Image: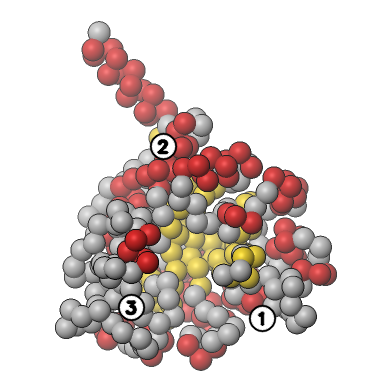
Amino acid sequence: MRGARARAAQALAAAFLVPAMSAHGFDLQGHRGARGLAPENTLPGFARALALGVSTLELDVGVTADGVVVVAHDRRLNPDITRGPDGRWLEPPTPTIRSLTFAELSRYDVGRIRPGTDYARRYPEQQGMDGVRMPRLADLFALVRKAGNAAVRFNIETKLSPLAPEETLGPEAFAESLLAVVREWAMESRVTVQSFDWRTLLAVQRLAPGVATSCLTARQRWMDNIGARADEPSPWLAGFRLSEHGSIPRLVKAAGCGTWSPFFGDLDRASVAEAHALGLKVLPWTVNEPAHMRAMLDLGVDGLITDRPDLARRVLAERGIGLPAPTPVEP
């Protein structure tokens, strides 16, 4: 009897394991790898996400002084997660990634969160480690190949700002650098490029029409790239104006993106329905609490970007939604 129960349990578990992201499957994205559990945007973090099972690895990229595309969220080294070669936490002002060669950047350790910071309080379950470096985008592609995962996708955010043009490459050069690595690894069909700075997305659409693009948006007091209340057009939107299109889904459609990726707190049922009617996928960020995950599923979103793919898998399993198969790998 025990053997029969065990076999039944195994069959039930297998029913929830599907290849990562079919054409119409739910898209479970590990934000910066699995930021709630492991150091963000690092090979150990991405390995943790792959071992849990995600359909997409979400990440951010910058470009170094010698033209290397690296996985990093901030234009400047973040003092909350970065220690120098002497082991001490960095103090502002920190250098930009653009001002450092890759060899220089590799001297910094990004494996822990600085104790006592708001960042540390937000991610108490992150398991820190020492000797962790910022990887190249090529290193991440190599890790996924090593894992034998031929289906997981990459949602790559370009980290540049129209408000700080001196800190990064310009939109066209940034897109060219990113696409060169994508092409070198033949990942065009598995990559989506996303950004709050839509200038980069238009550049990707011109340079590589076959690479998917996702328009990131936020309309919050702490961040608003739509700028609907401003007299001047938002510098983030590459010349597009909300007033000329009437709604954010129509604005996103006009910008040529196939996916609308809003802050989850900006979503409601009507906006999701409108986006779907326009042929857009809706992929909210960053959804970490199970109650919020369930609320997003109730709205009919096409996926979730989350720091906690482990919690998201439990919620998806509750709803009978197929889960991406784990592919454990050593970073």
Residue 60 place in picture, x, y as percent: 44, 69
- Judged from the image, the secondary structure of the residue bearing numbered disc 2 is helix
**Residue named by callout 3:** 79
Instruction: Say which quadrant the C terminus sits in.
Output: bottom left
> Label 2: few (<14), some or many (≥20) within 10 Å?
some
Residue flagged by tag 2: what amino acid is it?
Answer: Arg
Residue at the image point whose x is 53% and y is 57% from the top:
285
Extreme left residue here? 86
**Residue 212 in view:** yes
35 versus 97 height, above or below: above
Task: Tell me if 124 is positioned left or right of 306 in this view.
Answer: left
Q: Which of marks 1 and 3 is nearer the N terminus?
A: 3
Q: Which of 122 and 136 is in front in this view?
A: 122
The residue singled out by tag 1 in the image is 235
Q: Give the residue drawn at x 41%, y 37%.
A: 314
Calculate the distance from the C-alpha at mark 3 to the C-alpha at mark 2.
33 Å
Question: Closer to the N terminus: mark 2 or mark 1?
Answer: 1
Label 3 secondary element: loop
- 3 or 2: mark nearer the eye: 3
Query: Which residue in the structure is indicated by mark 2?
Result: 314
Q: What's the mark number on residue 250?
A: none
- Most extreme residue toward the front, as rendered? 116
Amino acid tagged 3: Pro
Residue 244 located left or right of residue 19: right
- Residue in the picture at 58% in, 70% down: 223
- The local crowd at label 1, few if under 14, some if 14 to 19, many if 20 or more residues have their Cα within 10 Å, is some
How many numbered discs? 3
Q: Where is residue 129 in the image (x, y as percent from the top left)?
A: 20, 63
Q: In which quarter of the image is residue 245?
A: bottom right
